[in-house]
Amino acid sequence: MEQSPLQALADALQDHPQRRAIERSIVSLLEIARSSSDSDEWRLINGALADIRDGLGVFAPHRQTRKVTVFGSARTSPEEAAYRLAQELAAEAVARGFEVMTGAGGGIMEAANSGAGCENSIGLNVDLPFEQHANRYVNGCDGRLLHFRYFFTRKLFFLRESDALVVMPGGFGTFDELFESLTLIQTGRTPPIPLVMLAPSGDHFWPDWLQDIQQDLASRGLISPEDTSLLKQASTASEAMAHICHFYRVFHTAQFAEDRMELLLHCPIPSDTLSNLNREFDELVDEGNISQGESCDSNGILRPCLRFHLDRRRIGLLYRLIDRLNDLPLEVTPAIEQPGQRVCSVPPCP
């Protein structure tokens, strides 16, 4: 007799390390089921869960490789300077060890996938009635193209899987992706990653926009003055990648441990430098001070870290701290994971 899906799920949960989280998810579905029999609502739930399932499956083999996401107009033609610049950016990103993610469409997305090549591209397509057909450079890449039903699940994976964002000139869709990213970064809902505004030399698309942001938003107090630190500008591929690589020179990643922020680093900070950082960035800390210790990254590697209670209204200041750390004249390890590094105990270290 064929086993029912519910019985198969119960069997699979017996020794699953995330059993409690899965059970809470099932309880949520049951609660929705008690109150809703609407077909549209269940179509939304099923579609969102299918998007998440497919996304997790595609990205699982690529978790160890850093990724640069490139946003930009689907209407940029191959004759334009921005198209060629996107190709150069992707090629340089691959040369520096990154994979390249795009929305899988035409224009800037096609150019970036072309520059990266099929073996280093990932495409996150979305179902649209026009424009958004997967470009030829990612369409035939086995296991590297996702078709999302919804924009919100697509955006989730862009931010969840990106280690850097490069935004090139574009229209409503590009600005939607830009502001969604800025909102999640500014509110601390996604770990800090570099965000680079890239346009060809002589193109004032981003300089004019950033000037307007400073004059109309910062001057009115609608954003914090340091929020402009969330953005970098570049006019060449090498300049954009220099910003991205410098962001990870000393800084490795950020994570929350209970009520504290942890900045995981590639090397420890000298004690006198730590004292200076506490004076310089006192407004970033909600209470107490910045202390140094060790913590485990997502791969179980024990790394030096800085711990503090973050004032989440000052994310722009957090980016300034990361810039300050990366500018320190410290000897850093040449690779993210190296033989001989200490690993965390099981259960994970405190």
Image: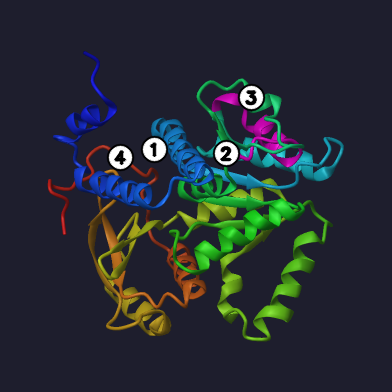
Question: Residue 338 shows which numbered tag?
Answer: 4
- Would you call the spot at circle 2 few (<14 residues within 10 Å), some (14-19), or many (20 or more)? some
Mark 4 in CB contact with mark 3 (< 8 angstroms):
no
Residue underneath mark 1: 64
Q: Nearer the viewer, residue 4 or 306?
A: 4
Tell me the kind of residue under disc 1: Gln
Magenta segment, prevailing SS (helix, strand or loop): helix
Whether residue 292 is situated above or below residue 301 in the rendered picture: below
Residues shaded magenta: 102-119
Q: CA distance from mark 2 to mark 1?
A: 26 Å
Q: Is residue 101 magenta?
A: no
Q: CA distance from mark 4 to mark 2?
A: 39 Å
Q: Nearer the viewer, mark 4 or mark 1?
A: 1
Residue 289, quarter of picture? bottom left
Q: Label 3: state its secondary structure.
A: helix
Image position of 107 (left or right of 324): right
> Residue sitting at 44 percent across and 45 percent down?
37
Identity of the residue furthest to the top in this view? 1
Q: CA distance from mark 4 to mark 1?
A: 13 Å
Residue 321, quarter of picture? bottom left
Q: CA distance from mark 4 to mark 3?
A: 35 Å
Measuring from the top left, give residue 177's x and y in whole percent.
Answer: 63, 54
> Residue sitting at 45 percent across and 55 percent down?
249
- Would you call the spot at circle 4 few (<14 residues within 10 Å), some (14-19), or many (20 or more)? few
Residue underneath mark 2: 149
Q: Label 4: state its secondary structure.
A: loop
Q: Earlier in the sequence, mark 4 or mark 2?
A: 2
> Which quadrant would the C terminus be assigned to in this image?
bottom left
Q: Earlier in the sequence, mark 3 or mark 1?
A: 1
Residue underneath mark 3: 139
Measuring from the top left, give residue 68's x and y in whole percent.
Answer: 55, 44
Q: Nearer the viewer, mark 4 or mark 3?
A: 3
